[in-house]
Amino acid sequence: MSETFRGEFNQKVDSKARVSIPASFRRVIEAGDPSFNGTNRARFVLVYGGADRDFLECYSLSEMQKLERRINKMPMGDKRRILLTRNLITLSQEVEIDEDGRIVLPPKGRDKIAIDTAVLKDGTEATFAGMLNTFQIWKRDTYDGVLADQAAIEEDILPEGEDMLSLLPDDPEE
């Protein structure tokens, strides 16, 4: 897929758990939905598995199909296959974007990112973070806290005075 999920967007979550998908993300989702033809609703896969995560990982249908093919190549009974299947397939849900560009965050997804009924009543925001071939949905407060913590981690990865692009591996096509 030539289009990617990029950028970060803060979106209000209404009292019915509806949230707008950023327009640029919708274009990538539509391009990655093999059955989307402009008259039907685009779909994507929302993954709420992974105990060590405070966010929802979202895949276009074509990206999820790539993962499924890779998992299917693994031997049945392989502990890694079971772990991947449970967290990426079992603990996921296909979601459809409505005519207004919104989704309803499913209950298990809301639980994952700590958006409960009380938070919905009082109002909250979700942050959509582009990650190239996936995007993440966070509760905004959690995302902001992780970004603050990330600065210290980045100091360990990137030596002072070094350009961030120096972290990239060499490109054999150049």
Image (cartoon, grey):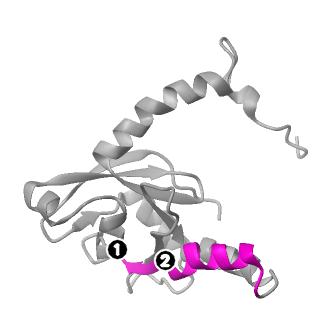
The number of numbered badges drawn on the structure is 2
**For residue 96, side relative to residue 68 (left or right):** left
Residue ID at (47%, 84%) = 37
Which residue matches tag 1?
108
- Residue 98 is situated, as x and y percent measured from the top left of the image, at 29, 77
Visible in this render: residue 104? yes
Verify whether residue 168 appears in magenta. no
Q: Which mark is residue 9?
A: none
What range of the chain is rendered magenta? 77-96
Give the quarter of the image for residue 149. Answer: top left
- Residue 61 is situated, as x and y percent measured from the top left of the image, at 55, 77
- Residue 39 is situated, as x and y percent measured from the top left of the image, at 38, 85
Callout 1 secondary element:
helix
Residue ID at (36%, 69%) = 109
Q: Residue furthest left?
A: 121
Callout 2 secondary element:
loop
Visible in this render: residue 106? no
Amino acid, disc 2: Leu
- Residue 140 is situated, as x and y percent measured from the top left of the image, at 30, 47
Would you call the spot at circle 2 few (<14 residues within 10 Å), some (14-19), or many (20 or more)? some
Compared with residue 159, is residue 72 higher up or lower down, i.e. above or below?
below
Q: Are marks 1 and 2 in contact (CB under 8 Å)?
A: yes
Mark 1 or 2, nearer chain start: 2
Distance Cα–Cα, label 1 vs label 2: 9 Å
Q: Depth check: give the residue in front, 163 or 157.
A: 157
Give the quarter of the image for residue 21. Answer: bottom left
Amino acid, disc 1: Lys
Q: Which quarter of the image is occupied by the N terminus?
A: bottom right
Q: Depth check: give the residue in front, 23 or 166.
A: 166
Main secondary structure of the magenta stretch: helix
Compared with residue 173, is residue 73 higher up or lower down, i.e. above or below?
below
Q: Which mark is residue 91?
A: 2
